[in-house]
Image (cartoon, grey):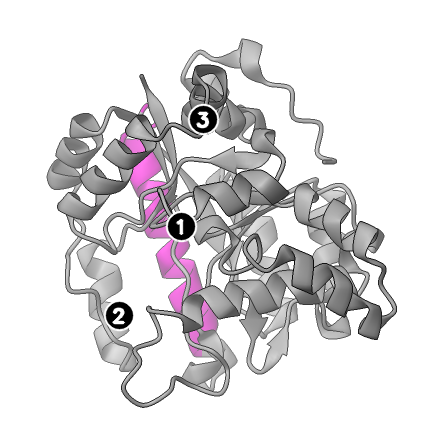
Amino acid sequence: MDRIDMHHHALPDGVIELMQELGLPTPVVRWRLETTLDVMDANKIEASVISNVFPCDVLGDAALARRLTRQVNEAAAEVVTARPDRFACFAMLPLPYVDLALEEAAYALDDLGAEGVVLLPHGGDRYLGDAMFDPLWAELNRRRAVVLVHPLDLPQGSAPGVPSVFADYLLDTTRGAIHLITSGTLDRYQDMSIILSHAGGFLPYAATRVGFAAALAGVDHTTVRDKIRRFYYDLALSVPSALPSLLATANPGHIVYGTDWSGVPAAVVEHGTRALDETGVLDEATRRAVNRDNALRLLPGLAHRLGDTHRIEHGGSV
């Protein structure tokens, strides 16, 4: 089976050097093309979609945010250019700088050939449903864009003794998704596709509670249910434990395979892939769709390069 990995991080050496210059933490595992292709081949991954994201507000300077974002996106595009048969990319946008984000989205989608964009669930201390982000959502909606939402630290920081990767990342995604629902953003902009990383954080597990609690924001639980089914979800670091809740709440046609390489070791990629192959909660048709077909419907450019144009059914709205 030839999988499409929708959650893949690639930071070449030039980007790492810039991160060090700017005082940003650098990854433990260095991305190398040869090693990456070995990992992909071992897990029957035909193509991976590169996404990288940083909290640009911590740089404290819009010019630095623009410089970092541009170098990150051009480096990802270079990988795609070198191996268009094995890679695609989502472009990082420098929130909370909305004007810069609009500029970078146009450059990445029109000139670099990015398949979509990747956003943090928040820019500074404001989550994605905030009105300040409406101009960006309007443009992404006009373009019928694919948007990956990838978490990092919560705006207020982590709790002592509990590293952010254990729970805060999942809460960050959950907060972002809830705010998109309760703010009405998903109602105003219906022609884009939003992928939530790591099976949506806590959202599928807490969907019932979120649905009824949303009444506090004037949103009824059926609306919440429908909006939860509108999101797409990647399975990075989520199989097998998250699958039952995800299948109970999400549209199976909106679930896609993901690994989180190179943010995690190869052994973790292998474990998650094997667990997906062995789980008894998916029938074979759904397993095939999750591994490949759902992703290719979202990414017609990649589908065309892989010769899978007959699978393109993506019309933007979900």
Pair 1/3: label in front: 3
- According to the picture, the residue beneath numbered tag 1 turns out to be 51
Please identify the dominant SS of the magenta region. Answer: helix
The tag earlier along the polypeptide, 1 or 3, is 1
Relative to 223, is 282 on the left or the right?
Answer: left
Residue 152 visible in image: no
Placement of 242 over or under 308, stated as above or below: below
C-alpha span from label 3 to label 2: 43 Å
38 and 33: which is toward the camera: 38
Report which residue position mark 3 lands on: 282
Q: Along the line of sight, which residue is nearer the eye, 266 or 220?
A: 220
Residue type indicated by callout 1: Ser
* Tag 3 secondary structure: loop
- Is residue 21 depicted above or below 31 in this figure? below
Which quadrant is the C terminus positioned in? top right
Q: Say if the magenta span includes residue 78.
A: yes
The mark lying in front, picked from 3 and 2, is: 3
Percent x, y for residue 108? 51, 48
Residue assigned mark 2: 18
Residue at disc 2, secondary structure: helix
Q: Identify which residue is drawn at 57% across, 31% down.
A: 252
Q: CA distance from mark 1 to mark 3?
A: 27 Å
